[in-house]
Amino acid sequence: MPELNDIEYKQLEKSILEKGYLSSNPIIVWRGYIVDGHARYSICKRNKIDFSYVELSEDMFDDIMGVVKYIIDIHICRRNLNIAQKISIAYKYRDYIVEWNKERQRKGSDGCKSRENYTDAQLAKIAGVGTGTIARYEIVRKSGDTDIFNKMMSGEVSVYKAYKKVTTRKPISRKIQKIKMQETNGNCEICGCCTSAILEFHHIKMVSEGGNNNYDNIKLICPNCHSLLHILNDTNDINAKKALLQSLKNTQYQKLVEIF
């Protein structure tokens, strides 16, 4: 959870010192770990103040993911958080969720095949949003546009509007277009076919992931190569991607293989 800043922490400490620890707001513990009340606990321990705590039943949660959801639910109820802030809190656990899923897959857990166990689906469930919102948040986060990201986090713009902002394509400058056409002599940079009338500009790093229109990030290619590149980018099945790359070796698509 977002930690209390110095002012908030001192205000809490002052309140506890003046009014004593309120037993109506106990520290919550599960299996010996504090689930809620870290700041109150540290203040009481440092000032030698008696405090109360409630220990949750060990079997209350099936696993750590249940605890994570419980912790976040507590704070979301207490604080007036916008959607982006809720997602950012869930994201603090993203690396753990990924490893947790891998471990379940290694053990062959039945549930790991369910959509509920995909990382994005779990993040969405924790934050109380749809998987589409998680995907749009991720695109904004990766875009490198700190201004629009900060506006999204402050609630000034919605996740959807921030996503639309960072994915709106800006035109490639005429100068770069002209240089590319001259350098390639109107031929595809990958397979070498001469189809200058229908060549397309491809972003090596996609715009949705923060790619720009700089010369080094642009390739002038034919529609066939462009389609293949996006198929490779969009293929989540690693084995299918490897098989496709292998089939392209020793052909006119060798340069495409090299990109990956």
Image: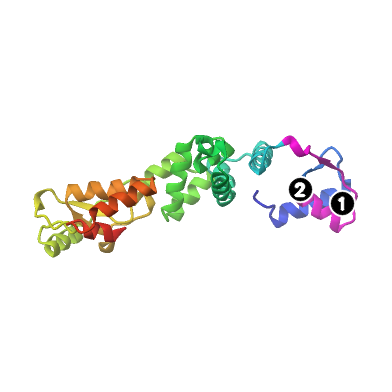
Neighbour class for label 2 at 10 Å: few (<14), some, many (≥20)?
some
Q: Identity of the amino acid at label 1?
A: Leu
The quadrant in which the C terminus is found is bottom left
Q: Which residue carries the number 2 mark?
A: 34
> Residue 17 — which label?
1
- Residue 160 % position (x, y): 43, 39
Residue 158 shows in this picture: no
Looking at the rendered structure, the secondary structure element under dot 2 is strand
Mark 1 to mark 2 CA distance (whole Å): 21 Å
Say which label, 1 or 2, has the lower sequence index. Answer: 1
- Residue 235 % position (x, y): 35, 45
What residue is at 70 percent from the left and 52 percent from the top?
A: 4
Residue 143 shows in this picture: yes
Left or right of 55 on screen, residue 118: left
Q: Identity of the amino acid at label 2?
A: Ile
Magenta residues, start to end: 32-60
- Residue 161 % position (x, y): 42, 41
What residue is at 21 percent from the left and 53 percent from the top?
A: 201
